[in-house]
Image (cartoon, rainbow, N blue to C red):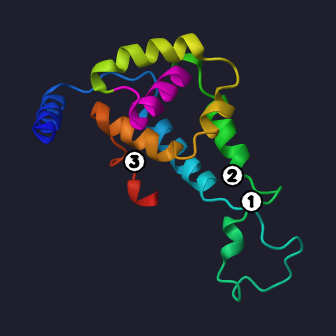
Amino acid sequence: MVANKKENQMAKNEELPPPELNISADKVCYIILKAREFDVKVEPSESDPGSNPTDDAGGEVLEDHGDDPTVAELRSAIDDLNDDEVVDLIALAWVGRGDFGREGWLEAKALARERHKRKSAGYLMGMPALGDYLEEGLATLGHSCEDWGMGRL
């Protein structure tokens, strides 16, 4: 019975046109890419690595070093958004996380606008699966990163 209800809701969502976003899919897809790069970072295993990258299978690229631009790139991508775009990004993450469905999009946006502060980048970057939440949020609303080249993610 629950499966039928979910299937009916998915069919209903496919019939509705996707809601218009204040943030472009290109920007969301870029942030998804950067969020996934950020999510895979791990603490460095050696304080002074001196090995050959070929010998360590390139694992150092996943280590979170102070000079790694990944954090700065993700933070900058979020900080460069205007308020309406940030509100949509937060609401997309909430939809993707399952806090709201497609029918709750306007409510999610209203709550995001109410809670949005200048520290939104820190809040969003604190979500451990931000890239996945944003991608799922886009899909729930009927948008995708297919045209952008999801194969890069």
Residue 22 percent location from the top left of the image: 44, 21
> Which mark is first along the chain, 1 or 3?
1
Please say if the residues under marks 3 and 1 sit with CB atoms less than 8 Å apart. Answer: no
Name the mark on residue 146.
none
Residue at 64% in and 26% down: 120
Res 135 seen here: yes
With respect to residue 152, does 87 lie above or below?
above
With respect to residue 10, does 115 lie above or below?
above
Res 143 seen here: no
Residue at 71% in and 89% down: 55
Question: Mark 1 falls on what kind of element?
Answer: loop
Q: Residue furthest right?
A: 48
Residue at 74% in and 59% down: 64
Which of the 4 quarters of the picture holds residue 107?
top left
Label 2 crowd bin: few (<14), some (14–19), many (20+), radius 10 Å: some
What stretch of residues is rendered in magenta?
85-100
Name the mark on residue 64.
1
Secondary structure that dominates the magenta span: helix
Label 1 crowd bin: few (<14), some (14–19), many (20+), radius 10 Å: some
All told, the count of numbered labels is 3
> Which mark is first along the chain, 3 or 2?
2
Residue 101 percent location from the top left of the image: 31, 27
Question: Mark 2 falls on what kind of element?
Answer: helix
> Which mark is first along the chain, 2 or 1?
1
Name the mark on residue 70.
2
Please say if the residues under marks 1 and 2 sit with CB atoms less than 8 Å apart. Answer: yes
